[in-house]
Amino acid sequence: MKLYKAILPAAVALIALTGCDSFLDIKPVGKVIPTTAEEFRSLITEAYNTVPNDRGLASMRSDEVLLDATMSSNDLGSYLDIWRWNDATPDENTATFSWRQFYHVLFIANYTIESERLMTGGSSAEIRQMVGEAYMLRAYMHFVLANLHAPAYTKCDPASTKAVPLKLDSDVEGMLGRSTLDEIYKSILNDLDSAEDYLNVETWEPGYNYRFNTLSVDALRSRVLLYMGLWKDSLEASKRVLAIKNTLSDINSELPNQYNSVENIVALEQVMTAQYARSVKVDRAFYGLFTSSDLRRSKYFNRVTSSNILIDKAGSNTYSCTLRVGEMLLNAAEAAWHEEEYDNAAEYLLTLQRKRFNDGGAAKEQAVAAMDKDELLEEILTERARELAFEGHRWFDLRRTTQPRIERTFKGEKYVLEEGDERYTIRIPSSAITANPGLAD
């Protein structure tokens, strides 16, 4: 498997990043400046390799994850306060979200975009493809940052709600303030438009498919627009993806979030790292969403005992997935429902379910046919929880939809995340605020 092994040792030497007191907590100190297309490919590959696994860390806050006293003290120290939403007084050993890494990737993306006309030694198509990938990286980093550290777009006034700093250049000396959520999302959509103009590689062979391709633009657009509640536009983007790529994995032979699965569109993130997968268990109530007829029950999880359920679709870079067909069908189903296209919403849902249940979805066909519209939406969202389990979607989906009350217990003590709780937004890391106190405003 070539996943990330294409990184050249020269990448770090081209532009090294180290600590300082500036806004980004980084500055370029390397003496060798990239000029050739080959050097910029190495630099972009470094950016891909630096993309954080924070969507996996955020999963600790969702209803997917169970922590118990059998965990090692080191793992409890890292994750317990995230799991119980203790953001005010976390243990000093609590794992931190990767603010600096996001802006490292943004620095490289911006530098690449700015350097388009300076690159030598590559064809115009190669250079344009790399710049397109840089636009996609910039869009995606801002998108994930906003969904970690700002209120959900559909739960606030985006025009007046402060989010994260928007970073659209490679200057690392300025102290930027927080942009509004509306500004962030407008920039994301603009970057997707730009990427669409530049990208020209339709597919990458497995092992190199961590790179963005032409289809990834509409795939990411489908998700972004769904999170914005722009249902019609999200549906149209999903349709465009599914018109080109619509084959679902045979779950008996491959899991859909494997980097080389037939439905993988971009295999960038190993969302649940080996450490995460080793440390946590599957919440028993969440596991209860999977009935005995659901093929995923035994393929996604290993039920050792009734209280010890482990994740099987995680823990190595085999399970690297950012965008895939299953999500596109679920995006289309949800968006179609909101557009009052209930029959179409049901068909998108059933297209997925026919491949995920051992009766070919026959029971689901009957059940869905008998549902009223509200029950249909509930089934779409529940199917989203099942299909995309432990792929970094659940916490974001809870935030943007119902923000439900979640209750959990550890060593006899109860912890509650109330409905609509402000802790559905993760605080900007204290280290970032120390470097730039303006982020606290």
Image (cartoon, rainbow, N blue to C red):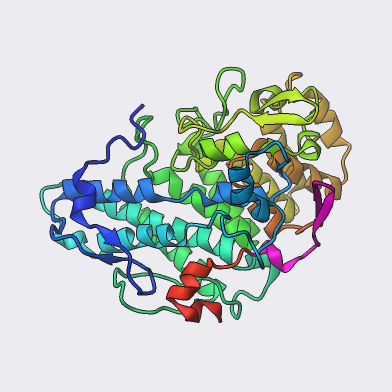
To which quarter of the image does residue 150 belong? bottom right
Residue at 69% x, 64% y is: 423
Camera-side residue of 368 and 436: 436
Q: Residue furthest front?
A: 73
Residue at 64% x, 65% y is: 425
Camera-side residue of 167 and 365: 167
Q: Is residue 206 above or below residue 375?
A: above
- Residue 270 in the image: state x and y as whole percent: 49, 40
- Residue 329 in the image: state x and y as whole percent: 62, 40
- Residue 74 in the image: state x and y as whole percent: 58, 44
Camera-side residue of 437 and 39: 437
To which quarter of the image does residue 106 belong? bottom left
To which quarter of the image does residue 28 belong? bottom left
- Residue 124 in the image: state x and y as whole percent: 18, 50
Q: Is residue 417 magenta?
A: yes
Magenta residues? 406-425
Q: In this rendering, does residue 364 appear at all?
A: yes
Residue at 13% x, 51% y is: 36
Q: In this rendering, does residue 192 appear at all?
A: no
Q: Residue furthest left?
A: 121
